[in-house]
Amino acid sequence: MSKLWEKGWELNSAIERFTVGKDRELDLLLAPYDIQGTMAHVTMLSHIGYISKDELNVLLPALEKLHTLAQDGKLVIEPDIEDIHSQVELMLTRQLGDIGKKVHIGRSRNDQVMVDIKLFTRASIKKTAGLVAELFNELQEASEKWKNVLLPGYTHLQVAMPSSFGLWLGAYAEALADDLAMLKTAFDMANRNPLGAAAGYGSSIPIDREETTKLLGFEDLDYNSVYALLGRGKFEKTVAWAYASLANTIGRFAADCCLYMSPNFGFISLPAELTTGSSIMPHKKNPDVFELVRAGCNKVANTPDVIGAIMGNLPSGYFRDTQILKEDFLPMFGRMDDILGITAFAVANLKINEDIYSNPLYLPSLSVEKVNALAAQGVPFRDAYKQIGLEVAAGTFQAKAPESAAALGHTHAGSIGNLCTAQIAARFNKTLEAFLISILTKD
């Protein structure tokens, strides 16, 4: 196997297989970014005199071709090659001879993989943010569409107070506004350049880190060379926490949908073609899409704990432990993006029960309305509460189902009758606009 660290001895084959692990497979996700980083690095090396202009003029076109191959999914890491860094350098050397061997001047695989991961993460968060916006819009549209349709609210899974489909769906839209803010923080961490930290202690070569920062579109530097590599693990965990927050929001929504699709509730449904069946029970229409969304969200939400367990109590400096981070971190983005896409599709196809309150089972949720009505007439709240409580206990409590959520007369901000949809959208869009400013031209 060709290795960048090769010094004349042959590595034991069992050690070789174990230490390479899944790097070849996972590094294909990083390939376009590794080449992008190399292009910036060699451009900088030319400007400080370590690569001639003629050498740069042959290196950049060769790297551009490799970049196109990587973007098209046609670049392959050969079976006897250790990782994407080795593969790129080998392909350049095959094509350009000794010039290809110069691309590693002034850097280490440590800062190289870190810049790859940051570039990959930056692009991935950008894509995720767009999908979050699509789901947000679907939830807000559905919230407004069904804002006057009553839905029982629950505490302790007991019928509690009247809610509405608008209030329920709007809650998850507002949750996404907070999740987007966390994604923006994660993006800001990804938008700092570690390249030039080498193995964590800088380089005796007078590299120009500001130039590579500008060439790669980073907002700023990870300045301290030790921290640039010490941030490995901390960086991934911070990003994973943002994705875990998003997963928690969508996972709870999926859990609601699984519950509400049960015939025992019957609040919502999906078209038959969006459900699956049973191999033995012909009547079944299963909410598999929401069950798998829930499970996938749980997997994403667990990622920060996995990263924390791997990195726990490591001293400063580089350790090979960090290689294992890729196995949970890199697939997290595609998994979350799939979840976002299918959830938005499901929301767009939801069907709701507009006649839930014709069932007397839910009329006790109107008891608070009765208490408040008495309080509005001057009855002390505790007396009103006791009066209605006694009626409920005696089975004499009576209430008439409102025609719509609006008929309940709730008017305060964030209530059934005042969803504050526009205000929630303004908060979401403010973060999204800040996001777009940050990511502009930073692909």
Image (tube, rainbow, N blue to C red):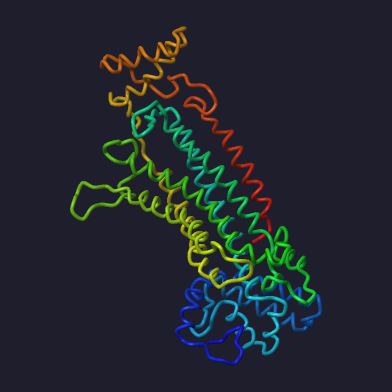
Which of the pair 343/163 is nearer the observer? 163
Picture coordinates of residue 136 (x, y %)? Answer: 52, 43
Picture coordinates of residue 131 (x, y %)? Answer: 52, 51
Picture coordinates of residue 362 (x, y %)? Answer: 32, 26
Is residue 228 left or right of 293 when viewed as pictured?
Answer: right
Q: Residue 109, located in which quarter of the rendered image? A: bottom right
Is residue 348 left or right of 259 when viewed as pictured?
Answer: right
Q: In this view, does 54 lie above or below 439?
A: below
Q: Residue lying furthest top in this view?
A: 378
Q: Residue lying furthest bottom in this view?
A: 8
| Residue at (69% x, 80% y) in the render | 103
| Residue at (54% x, 61% y) in the render | 312
| Residue at (47% x, 51% y) in the render | 340
Picture coordinates of residue 223 (x, y %)? Answer: 73, 62
Q: In this view, does 270 lie above or below 202?
A: above
Quadrant in which the C terminus is drawn: bottom right
Is residue 220 left or right of 430 when viewed as pictured?
Answer: right
| Residue at (29% x, 52% y) in the render | 276
